[in-house]
Image (tube, rainbow, N blue to C red):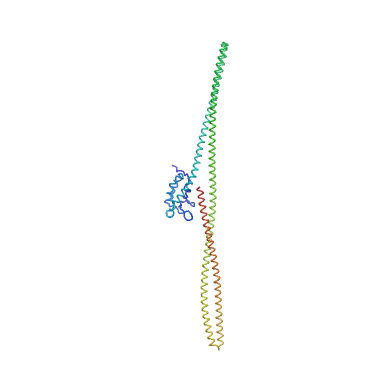
Amino acid sequence: MAPPSRIWDAYRTLGITNPNKAGLTCVGEIRHGKRCRWDIPSDDEPQVRSILNKMETKAPFDARPLLKRLGRLTLCEDYHRSQLMDKLKEWEDVIEDAEKFWQRAFLQVKARKVALKMLEKERDRTSQLEQEIARWKSGEQVNIATLVSVVKAEAEAVEENILRQETEKKLQDSQAHAKKMSDNHQAVLGYWNDLIRTSQYKDKEAQTMLEKHAETVKELLDTKHLFSTCQGECEQLRIDINKQNSIFDLNGAELDKLKVNHTEMSTSMEQLTVQVRAKGRTNGRLKAELAQITDERDLSLKEKVDLKTQLDYANGTIDLLKLSLAEEGASSIALSDSRQQLEQELRLENQKLMDLKQSKSQLEDDHAVLAEQELELKSQLSNEQSTSAKLQQSLEDAILKLTSSEDR
């Protein structure tokens, strides 16, 4: 036994099939109206396909009792089973639209079949009428020819009889002969009148049949016009379908373009992420160097404090030496040289400390610049993420629009 024919596409109409692959996925929705991508369990998939195949053999409206069971099998039990009522309402609206479209197509096909049957009947009826007219004409011609030949034969026989009687009787009784001839003539005239009336009656019947034939031809032309109208509607439907296919092709091209843009944006985001990470590593390295320089500065300050302490101690010692060794000029000069050397070392340490302060200021400036660059990169990354989210949403809207257009 051949499998029942499909009269509508339940898979596409109800959105059971994942548009990105051939498998069956959950029909629930996650955040931002996106489609759940969890596959339907392998144990439930044969039941889902069985229900959908059974629905496709019925009219869309007659398949509504199977929706509830189908919803339980195609929604995630752990996450999206609570969306069952919303999904049933959405499917009922979709099936209502599919039922309207199917009814229109069914009526057009039915009207076309009826028109074809009527045309076939009218063709058979016309053929029968033509055969009957042909038979009637042929029979009438044969009858008329037979009657004419009989009348001619009888007339010839009468003439021969008259001649023979005139020859045999030699005009015995002119009045009886004239009366007989008159009677024969009246009989012949009556016979011919009967033939003429019969021919007129046959002509009327032929005219009636011709009128019936004309009416039949008119009905046939009306049927042909109805058939042409149905053909025009079918042609318009085919043109609409071709236009819809063209729209599908354009939507597919736009979808491919959006996918390419999304891929490029993803690549740009990955590159910006790599740059931000590189800047972050550079910033961390500079922070480490700044911390090291800060430690060196603190160590230099500590050394400076020690030098000041030593200098103060040296100054005190020098004063003591000045008081105790005022007479020893050479020793005083030596101490003065030591003091100058210590002052020179102190100036060098001060200069070194100033250089460290300048380095610290430069590093702080560099750190501020890097912080600004980091903020700018973060802002660019945020903008890119927002643009990517918008492109993703546009891509999903285009997919939904394309799916809806295909369903319609």
Q: Determine which quarter of the picture holds residue 191.
A: top right
Single out the residue that lies furthest toward the left: 43
Viewer-side residue, 68 vs 352 = 68
- In the rendered view, tell whether residue 274 sits above or below residue 291: above
Q: Quadrant of the N terminus?
A: top left
Q: How many numbered discs sit on the rendered protein?
A: 0
- In the rendered view, tell whether residue 143 sits above or below residue 342: above
Image side of residue 366 versus residue 71, left or right? right
Viewer-side residue, 198 vs 344 = 198
Image coordinates of residue 203 in percent, x first then y, are 55, 26
Image coordinates of residue 3 in percent, x first then y, are 45, 43
- In the rendered view, tell whether residue 309 sits above or below residue 255: below
Image coordinates of residue 374 in percent, x first then y, are 53, 64
- In the rendered view, tell whether residue 52 sits above or below residue 291: above
Image coordinates of residue 309 in percent, x first then y, are 51, 80
